[in-house]
Amino acid sequence: MLFLAESNNVIHDLTGSVTELSWTDELNNGASYLEFSYIADGVVLENGSPVRLSSDDQADGYFYGIVFKVRGPDKNGIVEVKAYDRLRYCKAKDTIPISGDTVSTLVTRMCAFFGLPTGQNTDNGFVLK
């Protein structure tokens, strides 16, 4: 297992520092999230820090997400973190006008707004009103 986190543009291998790990995959109900604790040892994660969980030979990994909550370190130097995958950004409460857009253009605009990659996006031609 490989656990990487980025802080201040430096990628840290936290594999040996993680003390607890829980991954919840909410495929049909929203964003997946990863809760973990690690021994700080000089590594400070902040909201917005990317984290990645994978096996040693995986290119994409099991989980790639962004830190949303950080608590600690406590008196033992343990930091508790909760990170969500990028679907979490789709739960934002912002309003995007859709007049004349298709679902494809709406998704493209939303991803551009949040700085997310769109991947393959097939247009069905149906115009939203």
Image (spheres, rainbow, N blue to C red):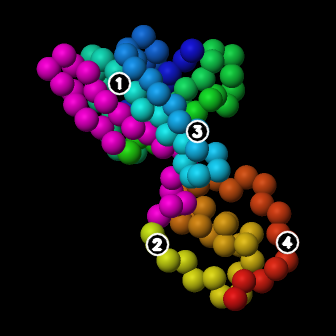
Q: Residue furthest left?
A: 75
Mark 4, Cα crowd under 10 Å, few <14 / some 14-19 / many 20+, is: few
Dot 3: element: loop
> Which amino acid type is shown beneath numbered disc 3?
Asp
Dot 1: element: strand
Q: Which residue is mark 2?
A: 94
Residue at the spot 35% in from the left edge and 24% down from the top edge: 37
> Which amino acid type is shown beneath numbered disc 4?
Asn
Q: CA distance from mark 4 to mark 3?
A: 29 Å
> Which amino acid type is shown beneath numbered disc 2?
Asp
Left or right: 89 as drawn, with respect to 59 = left
First in residue order: circle 4 vs circle 3: 3
Q: Which residue is mark 1?
A: 37
Q: CA distance from mark 2 to mark 3?
A: 25 Å
In percent of width and height, residue 44 lies at 29, 29
Q: Which residue is mark 4?
A: 124
Magenta stretch, residue numbers: 69-92
Tag in front: 3 or 1: 3
Q: Name the image quarter holding the N terminus.
A: top right
Dot 2: element: loop
Q: Which residue is mark 3?
A: 25
First in residue order: circle 3 vs circle 1: 3
Residue 53: within the magenta?
Answer: no
First in residue order: circle 2 vs circle 1: 1
